[in-house]
Image: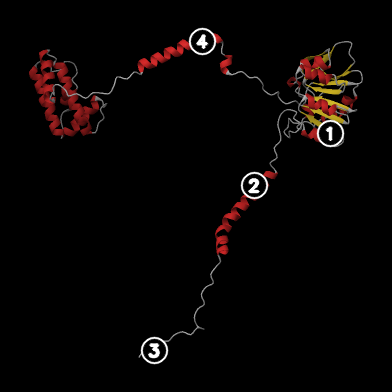
Amino acid sequence: MTTLVTPSPDTTEAAPPQKSGAATFWRKVRTPVAVLAAVALIGVLLSLGDEQFPGGHLEPESVRPDGTRALVQVLREDREVTVARSSSAAETALTGAEDAVLVVFLDHRLLPSELQELADLDVDTVLIQPSLHSLNTFVPGVDMTGRIEDDDPLEPHCDLPAGVEAGTADVGGEVYRATTGLSTQECYPAEEGASLLRVENDGSSTTVLGTGLPLTNGHLADEGNAALALNLTDADTVVWLRPDPPPQEGSASLWELIPEGVRWSLVPLVALLALLALWRGRRLGALVPESLPVVVQASETTEGRARLYRSRKARDRAAAALRSGFLERSLPRIGLRPDASPDAVVSALAQRLGEDPQTLRALLHPSGIDPYTGDDEGTARLAEALDELARRLR
């Protein structure tokens, strides 16, 4: 007799605890959350060192070799430096300043009235590669007389303290010369003039520098460039004027630039194109299906063409049609293309049928007088021979 044993409550296995909904949700989303957090952290770290600086020649905020950020940062250690992007901003920065110097570059972006207003401020000014209009406004009587192409540093050879204390400098560029009657000091001379020229006015001075190379980040540490730059801007307040390009205003459209006569000539041209479109695009209506009056069988067409050849004794055309039809049907069977040469066709047929190549050549590609076009019987023999060859190729 079999006895069933029921396990006691103490020996039964405990059921696994049920996990809460929040724990299950966190277990599912923790990996995506960790990945997104890592990506965000990497993006923040990369953006910390990705500060954008403007570019351009003698740009005070540019860190490139042709910028002047290094000089501006050095000047800001012991003097007040203002970067102006317009003449009005430069005038505002110079208002009330007792010991100030104005550095002007890209003066061709300023209007003549703006240049005159800056010249009337009666402050020390440094013009870097000035335009002719700027020279006439700030220092009348000073002209650009040439350009130095030599890359070697130049010696000052003058009594101007700014040049004497700096010594040799990379000032090769435009050179200037003043007419008689002006109180001027010339430094870094060349055959055609001087690269650095200072004109003394009543209570102020205007310095003309033929190149901005010694002020740039890439050449500031060379020779006496840094000393020359600091000496030229020796003031408590330095206003660096690099004007932005003037905004574009009042631009004309392409239609406004076209002369009026050309516009009126477009009227007949458009009318002509419209008539041409109507003529070429007219509809003839839907196609009307109609039955053919006569249905001609293919055999009757062949016989009719044969009778025409016979009536005109065109045995050469008939022979050519027979040979062309044979080759068109037979070339695919022997593995040749339709444009195969006569020698290749004769060779392939001779090898396939075991015939004499000369006999096949006279049959398919005769040279000289065709023996099969002399009379009707010859043309009939050609047709029978081609039919026999076609039969053997099947």
Q: In the rendered structure, which amino acid carries the disc numbered 1?
A: Leu
Closer mark to the observer between disc 4 and disc 3: 4
Distance of label 4 from label 3 (alpha carbons):
118 Å
Distance of label 3 from label 1 (alpha carbons):
105 Å
Identify the mark nearer the N-term, 1 or 4.
1
Residue identifier under label 4: 264
Q: Is residue 77 visible?
A: yes
Identify the mark nearer the N-term, 3 or 1.
3
Distance of label 4 from label 2 (alpha carbons):
60 Å
Identify the mark nearer the N-term, 3 or 2.
3
**How busy is the neighbourhood of tag 3: few (under 14 within 10 Å), some, or many (20 plus)?**
few
Identify the mark nearer the N-term, 1 or 2.
2
> x%, y% of residue 216?
77, 30
Residue identifier under label 1: 75
Closer mark to the observer between disc 4 and disc 2: 4
Residue identifier under label 2: 43
Q: Which residue lies at the image location 53% right of the left edge and 70% below the top edge? A: 18
Q: Which residue lies at the image location 70% right of the left edge and 45% below the top edge? A: 48
Distance of label 1 from label 2 (alpha carbons):
35 Å
SS class, disc 4: helix
Taking depth in this image into account, of 50 and 277 the one nearest to the observer is: 277
Distance of label 1 from label 4 (alpha carbons):
63 Å
- Residue 232, placed above or below residue 131: below
